[in-house]
Amino acid sequence: MSKLNFEQLTNLKLLLSIDGIGPGKLKALLKKLKSLENILSSEMQQLINVEGINTNLAKRIQYANKNKNYISQELEKELEKAVKLEIDIITIWDKEYPALLKKIFDPPFLLYKKGKFNEKDNCSIAVVGTRLPTQYGKLQAEKITSELAEQQLTIISGLARGIDSIAHRVALNNKTRTIAVTGSGLDVIYPPENRSLFNEISENGVVISEFSLGTKPDAMNFPRRNRIISGLALGCIIVETGIPGGALQTASFALDQGREVFAIPGNLDVKQSEGTNSLIQKGEAKLIKNAEDVLVELELRLKPVIGKNIPKPKVELNLFEEKILEALKGNSLQIDKLALKVDMLTSDCLVHLLSLEFKGLVKQMPGKVFSIL
């Protein structure tokens, strides 16, 4: 469970229950007012001085305290139910919270999860697509997910019918980790025929949602789910999708989040290929034929399982990565000492170290000690 105490969790739930307050607004409020308690006790002028908070929204924040007892009682019931269902509630301030997801513009402040995150989940690829795939789409989803699974990459998808279910199932069959992101409460399994798949994923990976227990799978929930799918992943593969389609929405979120988007080309005469072909045509997705194309683009180190000997692409480094490599020359440093040496927050340093690991330039040893490869 979260490191936040009951009072803090109540305040968080109370703020998130206010119409017009989402992760972006809450992030702005916290930046200015420093704590959940401060937000709820702030004067009108303090609230409207926060970017994006107008007078009406400020009034709703002040009025929210009248609902605190109700929110507190509901949270107590929810926590009891969560314990019975073996569901954990974590927040953006908890160590278990996924590092990649934390970096998007509007990360969910609160996550419900069944199962456990793993260090391997830092190296994840999303595989998404239509609920009504063609035979070609099914085969391509199976093929590319199998190849990614052979590399022990975590597969992320949305537990929906069609491509999503195939991606999860293939990952499980290949004994690699998979993460499912749902558009309902974790006690409302949707689609219902995926109950068995849900249970298998929670035992061998993790199922997550930002929606309170009891939340039904309403259409408005799925865009919020889709931003989490892309936010958890280094890259997003679109197998088949029409126009419009939820997978296109996931691709759009991925682009906004600075994540790579890949698409498998399809038959021009099939509506399930219209979305993928359009992404490629507009230059919004890279055309891929296999997992090797994805791995090379992301500069992930390949095992001998896939492909041939591929020349190592020229590695581009940002200023922070260069600074870290310079500090590690001839040294093995524990993360806290390294962060101090390069004058970075430990969390930021870890993000750049993760990038350097993916580029095959540094390695992590026990005790969060890092050295150059």
Image (cartoon, helix red, strand yellow):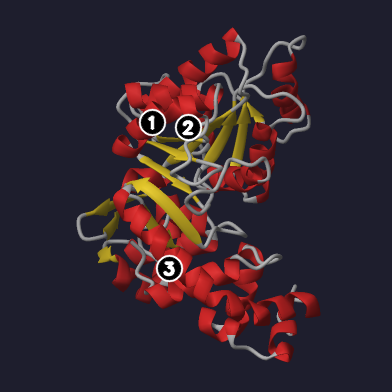
Give the class, few, some or many, for how many residues have Cα within 10 Å of label 2's Cα (few <14, many ≥20): some
Q: On the image, numbered disc 1 is attached to which residue?
A: 302
Q: Amino acid at mark 1?
A: Leu
Where 190 sits versus 276, above or below? below
Looking at the rendered structure, the secondary structure element under dot 2 is helix
Q: Position of residue 266 (x, y in %)?
A: 68, 15
Disc 3 to disc 2, how far (Cα)?
31 Å
Where 186 sits versus 134, above or below? below
Q: Reading the chain from its start, which is encountered first: label 3 or label 1?
A: 3
Give 359 or 203, whichever is nearer the viewer.
203
Q: Position of residue 66 (x, y in %)?
A: 60, 79
Q: Nearer the viewer, mark 3 or mark 2?
A: 3
Q: On the image, numbered disc 2 is attached to which residue?
A: 295
Q: Reading the chain from its start, which is encountered first: label 3 or label 2?
A: 3
Q: Reading the chain from its start, which is encountered first: label 1 or label 2?
A: 2
Give 153 or 13, whichever is nearer the viewer.
13
Q: Tell me, yes or no, if residue 79 can be seen here.
A: yes
Q: Position of residue 96 (x, y in %)?
A: 36, 58
Quarter of the image where one finds residue 194: top left
Q: On the image, numbered disc 3 is attached to which residue?
A: 93
Disc 1 and disc 2 in contact, CB within 8 angstroms:
yes
